[in-house]
Image (cartoon, rainbow, N blue to C red):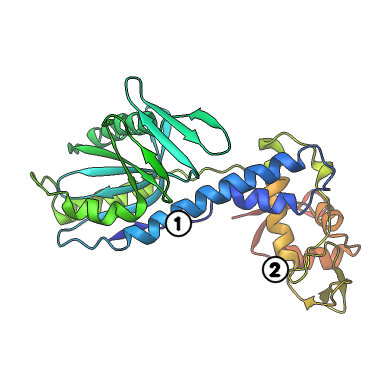
Amino acid sequence: MLYKERSAPLKLVGLQALIERLPSTHDKFLDIQEEIRKRAAGFSGEGNFDRHIREFRPSYPYALLHDICLKQNGVYFQMDSLLITPAFVIIFEIKNLAGRIIVKTNPTQFIHENVERKIIQSPITELERKEIFLQKWLEARGVYIPIKGVVALAYTNELTIPDSPDRQVVFTHDIPILLYKTKLENEILQQHEIHNLANEIRREHHEYNPFPLVKTIKMEAADVLPGVICPYCKYRGMTWLQRKWICEKCLYKASYSHRRLIEEWFMLLDSKITNREFRNFSCLNDPDVAKRHLKNSCLVMKGRMRNAYYYQK
């Protein structure tokens, strides 16, 4: 049973919003574009894994959770996907790498050959670290169960493994067959225990919050360009007229285009917003209209008069 689905990483969502509000001449524009490309490719690879593992429908009870981050002894550890069965738990480390991959042991190395040959951080080493932290996290809750680690390659690569590594390295399309062939030798958890454990993991999940991005990636707030962006043609600079936002470029009209702008404010610039800040960011002159927009945007107001500001629940 699926207990936690995967959603787009907040950092990716924020960067995509940021790139629309940066001039192409900005000194970080190309770096942000490249980071978006890498994060989007990683998320796409995880989606590929999710599609294949849906084929796994065993006769025994199980729990599946995607994109989990737990905390053990003050240390956060993130797992791409986690499968709980009656006999063992599997951590999946998902990698989206194009080209040829060579896996070596003693010491463990992942060599990636695409345009050039380079050694990348070993997913097996990452798995070993996460297995240790998850084992301690489970034992602190009285759960003693074997933990396995699997490196899942999102797309079919040329894969060379001269020696057998400590952890399985497989393609995502092979995951269902791998799981069906893995027998349950010593069942430890009953169905209700799997259910309770999965719910506790979901409750203890820590969502990484990279916002506001101007602080996370250390850039000036003044570099973020203002203006309501047209949802149809992406023109930045819709005008509020006759109770609607109107795009000067394609003439698209909508009443609530400012809500996306407010979301982008919290993602990019600050955790609260004043009437004046909203007017400056939306290029809106009327403070009464601005107040009405802010009050109707599911925000919480704190303070009065000139000291009033709004924040998300």
First of labels 2, 1 by sequence position? 1
- Residue at 60% x, 42% y: name it: 210
For residue 74, side relative to residue 223 (left or right): left
Query: How far from the left and from the top, in percent, is residue 304?
Result: 77, 53
Q: Are marks 2 and 1 in contact (CB under 8 Å)?
A: no
Q: Nearer the viewer, residue 36 or 8?
A: 36
Q: Mark 2: which amino acid?
A: Asn
Q: Residue at x 41, y 43 (%)?
A: 158
Quadrant that contains the N terminus: bottom left
Tag 2 secondary structure: loop
Residue to which mark 1 is pinned:
47
Location of residue 144 (image quadrant): top left
Residue 7 percent across, percent down from the top left: 49, 56
Tag 2 residue: 296
Quadrant of the image for the C terminus?
Answer: bottom right
> In the displayed structure, does residue 37 sit left or right of residue 71?
right
Q: Secondary structure at mark 1?
A: helix
How far apart in space, not on screen, are marks 2 and 1 (Cα)? 35 Å
Camera-side residue of 195 and 130: 130
- Count neighbours of disc 1 (C-alpha within 10 A) and say few if under 14, some if 14 to 19, many if 20 or more: some
Q: Amino acid at mark 1?
A: Gly
In this rendered view, identify the residue nearer to me: 2 or 197: 2
Residue 215 visible (yes or no): yes
Q: Residue at x 18, y 39 (%)?
A: 145
